[in-house]
Image (tube, coloured by chain):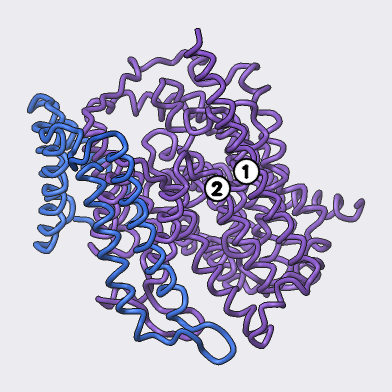
Chain colours: A purple, B blue
């Protein structure tokens, strides 16, 4: 531990120069703005900064890239909360309770809770990265395709909690999401499925789906219902933007739990952050005394996923740094950046280039602090900007969604995808079909299918591989318990509601 | 059942039917594991079955309530705005084939603001110009995305 602390101190010594401090601050700001724009996320942010980073010394370049990565995580929440247009899959859960808070005039408070919870989650993830990365990596290699498949299934099992009142509708949405995710080249056999046009060979970009489903779908719904926002006049009263002590106390427990969950699950390659946010939300809903308030602007429903999402960022760097395995699009580009700097990610990285790695980690710590301060200070700007455009919000959101979809691949193909899913999102909203299970299936199903088929191959065609391994059995037991608990909770709530209705009728 | 829900379930059923036909030609198994046709085939059938169950359940509930007429509950005028917005966006995206994304998008924004959101022409012009300028500055100039 002392050795770790002295190495971290060495890292701080490298980055605490005026040039690097300003660079990290600017990187965070750039990442926040990029992350806030629909269609652009961590991958785009890091990719945009790569040419600039290449011209710098290695420590500064890595600090720039990781600062942008962290910043995009903060930025993605802004559009999710203010205009219900999540910038990436983890931000979908943010929108579930963040957007209703905005609709009742508490957008600033929602952004404040998001910023503080994100900071705490990020710090928690960084502590694990600093002290436990080698230990975690040592055990992470015991997870194979069967364990990864079951973890994806555990993530999908949270549809029971996202299903709302109607399980049949939730199930059909999950099946629809899984089917949509099969479009494109199959990862195992290379067989191209349902590619009517060459653009479909790489599958449908889920960011285009999110932009359409949540951004355009919401606009169409608001146009039909003639919804007008009434956010009041622009103001600089700090009580509108800084959460009160009572609100912070409410967010305390969920933030702590979300931070732990995000750190642990963020280590999983592929969809760690997404699963972490969905599981955090599901856990808080189970623990809450008022689960019926989730989806209507509940503080716990916002704080926990925000903490887990940012805790997953350092978590996703652990397999990258220690095993050379990127866990997401953003970390895949980071892998390219590390190679560009002449570093070889893997078990020997921390031995051969430890000073650079610790400088990068120290930069992340500093970026997290700067992001908390800058995001809290920028909240009045974002909310007042929204107040300024609330009368013409529909057309502004349409423009952002169209340009955001275009920016994914510089072609109109993704705009058409966004538009189609905008119509689907509108119809889903109109007829109470839940979007959460659908988008969860779109994100997790390709990975789940991939790991499932790999597992069956490993087991030589035998399904017993899923229950012959102790970690797999533990995950199966956890999943069964989670589903049973959710079903019991549902039945209990229904009984309680029926009793309340009977009592009211008797009066 | 609402017309919109019938339409939505119909779209899902058509999509599932098409993928079912497409997946029949794909290998269901491949060596010792499942093939590329495994998941699409099962999901297509599942969607068709679930869509039929939802439709049947709604019909049964209606019959139990004594009303078997399929009708939409919203007045048609509300949906006109949505259809008009979708048509405008479609036209704007189609017009990008003439070389620019921003110009047709700007026109689309102006028409939506003036006609659907019922703002004055001055507000529509100003908000459109400011938004287009901001988008051009961020996406076009800073991020070098070819939107003009």
Q: Residue furthest top?
A: A507
Q: Secondary structure at mark 1?
A: helix
Rendered view: B8 above or below A57: above
How far across and down, in percent of the image, does residue A247 sit?
A: 61, 20
Q: Is residue A369 visible?
A: no
In this rendering, position of residue A12 left or right of residue A179: right
In this rendering, the answer to whether A453 lies above or below B89 is: below
Q: Which residue sits furthest right? A: A2
The reply to whether label 2 and label 1 mark residues of one chain is yes
In the rendered view, does A271 fall on the left or right side of A229? right
Residue lying furthest bottom:
B31
Residue A32 position within the rendered picture, expressed as x and y whole percent measured from the top left? 48, 43
**Residue A317, picture quadrant:** bottom right
Tags 2 and 1 touching, CB below 8 Å: yes
Tell me the crowding category of disc 1: few under 14, some 14 to 19, or many 20 or more residues within 10 angstroms, Cα based. many
Residue at 53% from the left image edge and 32% from the top image edge = A294
Q: Which residue is mark 2?
A: A160
Answer left or right for A150 relative to A294.
Answer: right
Q: Residues within 10 Å of mark 2 (few under 14, many from 20)?
A: many
Q: Quadrant of residue A214?
A: top left
Query: In front: A337, or A198?
Result: A198
* Residue at which label 1 appears: A486
The residue depicted at 72 percent of the width and 60 percent of the height is: A475
Residue A365: tell me if it is visible. yes
Q: Which chain letter goes with mark 1?
A: A
Task: Say above or below: B53 vs A95.
Answer: below
Q: Is residue A318 above or below residue A237?
A: below
Q: Which mark is residue A297?
A: none
Instruction: Please provide percent x and percent y for residue B66.
Output: 25, 34
Whole-percent x, y for residue A154 in the image: 63, 57
Give me the chain letter of mark 2.
A
């Amino acid at each position: 531990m002392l050795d770790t602390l002295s190495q971290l101190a060495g890292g701080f010594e490298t980055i605490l120069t005026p040039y690097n401090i300003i660079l990290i601050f600017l990187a965070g700001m750039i990442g926040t703005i990029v992350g806030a724009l629909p269609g652009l996320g961590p991958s785009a942010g890091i990719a945009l900064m790569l040419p600039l980073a290449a011209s710098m010394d290695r420590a500064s370049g890595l600090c720039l890239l990781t600062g942008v990565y962290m910043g995009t995580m903060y930025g993605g929440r802004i559009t999710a909360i203010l205009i219900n247009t999540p910038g990436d899959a983890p931000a979908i859960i943010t929108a579930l309770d963040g957007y209703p808070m905005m609709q009742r005039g508490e957008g600033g408070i929602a952004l404040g809770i998001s910023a503080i919870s994100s900071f705490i989650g990020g710090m928690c993830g960084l502590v694990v990265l600093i002290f436990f990365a080698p230990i975690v990596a040592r055990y992470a290699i015991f997870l194979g395709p069967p364990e990864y498949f079951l973890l994806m299934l555990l993530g999908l099992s949270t549809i029971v909690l996202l299903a709302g009142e109607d399980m049949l509708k939730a199930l059909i949405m999950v099946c629809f999401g899984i089917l949509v995710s099969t479009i494109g080249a199959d990862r195992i056999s290379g067989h191209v499925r349902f590619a009517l046009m060459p653009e479909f060979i790489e599958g449908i970009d889920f960011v285009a789906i999110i932009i359409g489903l949540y951004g355009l779908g919401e606009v169409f719904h608001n146009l039909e219902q003639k919804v007008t926002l009434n956010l009041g006049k622009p103001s600089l009263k700090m009580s509108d933007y800084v959460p009160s002590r009572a609100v912070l106390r409410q967010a305390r427990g969920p933030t702590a739990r979300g931070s732990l969950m995000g750190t642990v699950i963020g280590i999983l390659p592929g969809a760690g952050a997404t699963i972490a946010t969905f599981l955090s939300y599901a856990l808080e809903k189970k623990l809450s005394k008022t689960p019926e308030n989730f989806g209507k602007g509940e503080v716990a429903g916002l704080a926990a996923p925000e903490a887990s999402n940012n805790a997953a960022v350092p978590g996703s760097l652990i397999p990258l740094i220690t095993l050379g395995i990127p866990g997401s699009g953003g970390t895949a580009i980071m892998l390219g950046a590390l190679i560009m700097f002449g570093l070889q990610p893997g078990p020997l990285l921390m031995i051969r280039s430890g000073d650079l790695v610790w400088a990068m980690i120290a930069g992340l710590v500093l970026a997290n602090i700067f992001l908390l301060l800058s995001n809290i200070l920028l909240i009045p700007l974002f909310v007042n900007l929204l107040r300024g455009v609330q009368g013409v919000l529909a057309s502004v959101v349409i423009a952002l969604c169209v340009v955001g979809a275009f920016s994914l691949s510089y072609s109109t193909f993704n705009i058409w995808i966004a538009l189609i899913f905008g119509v689907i999102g509108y119809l889903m909203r109109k007829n109470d079909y839940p979007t959460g299970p659908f988008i969860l299936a779109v994100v997790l199903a390709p990975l789940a299918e991939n790991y499932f088929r790999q597992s069956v191959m490993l087991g030589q065609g035998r399904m017993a591989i899923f229950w012959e391994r102790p970690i797999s059995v533990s995950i199966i037991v956890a999943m069964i318990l989670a589903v049973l608990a959710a079903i019991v909770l549902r039945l209990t709530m229904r009984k309680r509601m029926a009793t309340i209705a009977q009592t009211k009728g008797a009066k | 059942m609402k017309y919109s829900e019938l339409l939505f379930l119909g779209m899902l059923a058509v999509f599932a039917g098409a993928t079912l036909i497409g997946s029949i030609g794909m290998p269901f198994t491949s060596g010792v594991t499942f093939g590329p046709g495994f998941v699409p085939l099962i999901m297509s059938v599942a969607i068709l079955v679930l869509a039929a169950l939802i439709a049947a359940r709604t019909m049964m509930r209606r019959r139990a309530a004594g009303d078997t007429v399929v009708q939409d509950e919203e007045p048609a005028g509300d949906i006109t705005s949505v259809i008009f917005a979708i048509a405008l966006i479609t036209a704007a995206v189609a017009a990008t084939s003439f070389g620019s994304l921003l110009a047709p998008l700007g026109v689309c924004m102006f028409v939506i603001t003036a006609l659907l959101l019922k703002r004055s022409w001055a507000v529509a012009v100003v908000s459109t110009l400011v938004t287009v300028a901001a988008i051009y500055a961020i996406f076009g100039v800073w991020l070098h995305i070819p939107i003009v």
